[in-house]
Image (cartoon, rainbow, N blue to C red):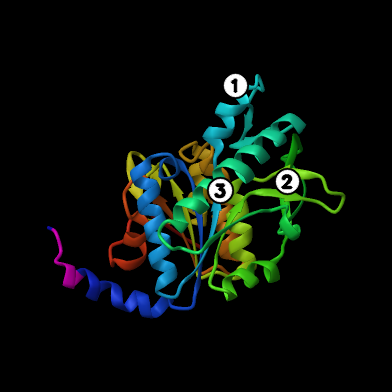
């Protein structure tokens, strides 16, 4: 049944009051980044959230486009537990696609809605400081683990009513640049900012097991599903990062379906919500 506009607004009011002045971090990826109508609704959604007084920080992905460009350049793509093996050639592609093309496209789209977005990469002013990451002792090349987030730098933008849009590449003290998984980067940013919520937008309803959506997922059950193989591929770092942020003080983490128009607003401002909520 379609709710009247009045009912929808009244249902949203307590959430607007609750979250005014809070910070939300959104990991933006999947179809919501590639399909024109979804890109537009996403830009509208984050602008609405900002206009009602919520601080929005976006960390975007772009894995499919990185893979496509790498293939055109004759660079092979290999994944280990959802993480992209990254040699120097692959890191160059990652920088070109994420910090260049995609970042500016996202910023431009949000600003057509008067969202006040500003594009950043993790290299800017040591925003995402990183060191080499090893997956269970396996060398992933120039894949980075974030060791520190330049919170003061981000707060400068938020204090001036701007919306940071971050490309997830990291840098170490020697200036070596690393590919950083966007889900993990979003978790690190949310933790550093002590954000109220962290949202992962992807091309699935949420976490699914036995063909059914899990509306609320505990850490123990998540471990079991990883062991069983129900949680696999790119969902593994997403879920691991989610629980890491919860342990670090982020209030709530949500995995939502970016293929549904306005899924971000539906998750925040309706009683039922959408997707999977992760809890300790």
Residue 164: which quarter of the image?
bottom right
At x 29%, y 72%, the residue is: 12
Is residue 227 highlighted in magenta? no
Residue 150: which quarter of the image?
bottom right
Picture layout, residue 257 above or below residue 158: above
- Mark 2 crowdedness (10 Å alpha carbons): few <14, some 14-19, many ≥20: many
Mark 1 vs 2, N-terminal side: 1
Position of residue 247 in the picture relative to residue 153 (left or right): left
Picture layout, residue 140 above or below residue 12: above
Label drawn at residue 144: 2
**Alpha-carbon distance for marks 3 and 1?**
22 Å
Q: Residue 149: x and y, percent? A: 70, 62
Q: Residue 64: x and y, percent? A: 52, 33
Residue range in magenta is 2-7
At x 45%, y 38%, the residue is: 230
Q: Decide which of 165, 109 is in the foreground and name it.
A: 109
Is residue 4 highlighted in magenta? yes
**Alpha-carbon distance for marks 1 and 2?**
25 Å
Is residue 222 among what the camera can see? yes
Q: In the rendered image, which residue does mark 1 sit on?
A: 72
- Helix, strand or loop at label 2? It is strand
Q: In the rendered image, which residue does mark 3 sit on?
A: 104
- Mark 3 crowdedness (10 Å alpha carbons): few <14, some 14-19, many ≥20: some
């Amino acid at each position: 049944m379609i709710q009247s506009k009045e009912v929808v607004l009244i249902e949203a009011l307590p959430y607007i009051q609750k979250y005014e002045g809070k910070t939300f971090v959104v990991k933006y990826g999947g179809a919501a980044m590639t399909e024109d109508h979804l890109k537009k609704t996403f830009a509208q959604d984050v602008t609405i959230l900002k206009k009602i007084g919520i601080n929005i920080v976006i960390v975007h992905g772009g894995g499919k486009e990185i893979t496509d460009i790498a293939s055109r350049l004759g660079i092979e793509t290999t994944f280990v537990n959802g993480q992209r093996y990254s040699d120097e050639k692959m890191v160059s592609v990652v920088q070109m696609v994420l910090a260049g093309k995609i970042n500016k496209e996202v910023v431009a789209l949000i600003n057509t809605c008067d969202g006040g977005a500003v594009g950043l990469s993790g290299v800017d002013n040591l925003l995402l400081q990183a060191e080499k990451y090893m997956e269970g002792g396996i060398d992933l090349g120039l894949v980075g683990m974030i060791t520190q987030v330049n919170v003061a730098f981000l707060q400068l933008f938020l204090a001036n009513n701007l919306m940071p849009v971050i490309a997830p590449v990291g840098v170490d003290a020697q200036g070596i640049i690393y590919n950083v998984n966007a889900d993990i980067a979003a978790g690190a940013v949310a933790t550093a900012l002590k954000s109220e919520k962290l949202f992962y937008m992807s091309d699935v309803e949420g976490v699914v097991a036995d063909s059914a959506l899990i509306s609320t997922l505990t850490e123990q059950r998540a471990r079991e599903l990883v062991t069983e193989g129900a949680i696999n591929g790119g969902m593994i770092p997403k879920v691991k990062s989610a629980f890491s942020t919860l342990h670090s003080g982020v209030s709530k983490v949500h995995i939502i379906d970016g293929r549904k128009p306005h899924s971000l607003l539906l998750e925040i401002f309706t009683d039922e919500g959408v997707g999977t909520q992760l809890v300790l």
